[in-house]
Image: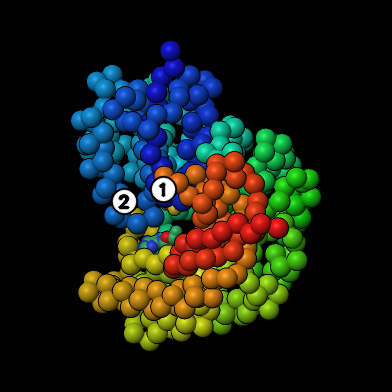
Amino acid sequence: MAKKLFIETLGCAMNVRDSEHMIAELNQKENYELTTRANEADLIVINTCSVREKPVHKLFSELGVFNKLKKPSAKIGVTGCTASHLGEEIIKRAPYVNFVLGARNVSKITEVLHRNKAVETQINYDESEFAFKEFRSSPYKSFINISIGCDKQCTFCIVPHTRGEEISIPSNLIVDEARRSVERGAREIFLLGQNVNNYGRRFSGNHKKMNFTQLLREVSAIEGLERIRFTSPHPLHMDDAFIEEFATNPKICNSMHIPLQSGSTAILQQMKRGYSKEWFLDRVARLRALAPETFISTDIIVAFPGERDVDFQDTMEVVEQVKFDQIFSFKYSPRPHTEAEHYTDVVESAVASERLSHLQAIQDAILDEKSRHYVGRRYRVYFEELRQDGYIAGRSDNNLAIRVQGSDALLGTFAEVEITQSARLSQIGEIVVA
Ligand code: 5AD
Ligand code: SF4
């Protein structure tokens, strides 16, 4: 009889893909099947994120809960970024954990399963780390890694420590994986990397050299593939050729996540981001000139050490000028193994909270204003989710989350939808009968 696997995935899309790979490995080599009930699982895996401190605290309370409700024979594994940076400390603090497997080591899941108290967190790598097995959370779209690790040294970020140095995956593997996904019915692919537009800087061996713009062209030649998305590009590497390809290639979706982090050039320098406020605004202007409808989302950190009122004002200026379609905003959280951890000019917590609330209030007003314009407009939607409330949900090319009443026969198909009701980050519409 098949054994049961319960897996919880925190963090980013890279983690989602890592979880898919572990699910496939466990299924093919160890006959595990997924369950959504932790209490009936034979193996519980938490695939963790460590980008901010809060989820790390949460991990230990969650582990305690799983330990109480699990079957006595069930194993618990901690994988992902927190596993990478805490390593055996996890087993010291939660001795019932059976194994710890870093973000760069997920291919070893079936091996550590049989070594009690195994801790695998090293950053060396072989090509098995990107020969990911086939399991897809969605039959309609596929996440595909194009690189692993990160070579940047943003002073706030733990990821280079947890995921190691950046290696681009050979383009032929990426194109093959995308082609196989399309053959199995996915019409959208999502290319993943910490810095996608830095693609091609370092390969593991003697592989065909190409940059991200060229990779996009190769992937878009796949017949039957209709949509390409990617995350995340780095503002520094947004050259004109990339923006032009983005704007003119009909398969590339009209949506881009461009992490700003701060609008203050002084703070950007402290963060070692490599660009200025002006450069960021210039790139957005170039993008909007060529592709005016582009949905632009961003990440912003407030209260980075040394952030003065004038710096925060710079961030707000960028927010008000760009009018992002979505902002993921965070209070700065000091992380181990980062340079900024040692910065002493910490911003007071009350000031940080105030700045975050202010930013979010302004952004809400911007989105309220934007959402008024959606009603009555028509978008081509790719339906991918049957929601619990009975709606069928999907996304427009420009990344609006749109749902309609309809049957699940719509899943995996495209339809023209007119928006009838609009809220900040979700739209309701009706399919327009031709
Ligand atoms: N504190 C707060 N936010 C952070 N991020 C990364 N590191 C930190 C940190 N130390 C945010 C960045 C990044 C997103 C994934 O998380 O905005 O783009
Ligand atoms: Fe993803 Fe970064 Fe979180 Fe790791 S730390 S899971 S790379 S967001």
User: Could one spot residue 87 in this view of the protein?
Assistant: yes
Residue at which label 1 appears: 389
Vertical placement of residue 238 versus 107, above or below: below
Q: Does the residue labelled 1 lie within 8 Å of ligand 2?
A: no
Q: How far apart are marks 1 and 2 (CA)?
A: 29 Å
Vertical arrangement, residue 394 with respect to residue 132, above or below: below
Which of disc 2 and disc 1 is earlier in sequence?
2
10 Å crowding of disc 1: few (<14), some (14-19), many (20+): few
Q: Which amino acid does label 1 sit on?
A: Asp
Q: Do residues under tags 1 and 2 come within 8 Å of each other at their CB atoms? A: no
Mark 2: amino acid: Pro
Q: Residue 104: which numbered mark, if any? A: none
Q: Is residue 307 left or right of residue 220?
A: left
Q: What residue sits 32% from the left and 62% below the top?
A: 333
Identify the residue shown where x is 65% and y is 51%.
414
Regarding mark 2 in the picture, which secondary structure is present there? Answer: helix
Residue bearing the label numbered 2:
55
Residue 271 makes an appearance in the image: no
Where disc 1 sits, the SS reads loop
Name the residue: 34% across, 82% down: 308
Pinpoint residue 82: horizontal percent, then vertical percent.
Answer: 36, 45
Q: In which quarter of the image is residue 309?
A: bottom left
Q: Residue 47 placed where, x, y %?
A: 40, 40
Residue closest to the eye, 278 or 416: 416
Q: Which of 139 and 218 is in front in this view?
A: 139
**In the rendered view, would you say 175 is above or below 21?**
below
Q: Does the residue labelled 2 lie within 8 Å of ligand 2?
A: yes
Write down the quadrant of residue 331 in the picture.
Answer: bottom left
Q: How crowded is mark 2: few (under 14 residues within 10 Å), some or many (20 or more)?
A: some
- 408 sits left or right of 303 in the view: right
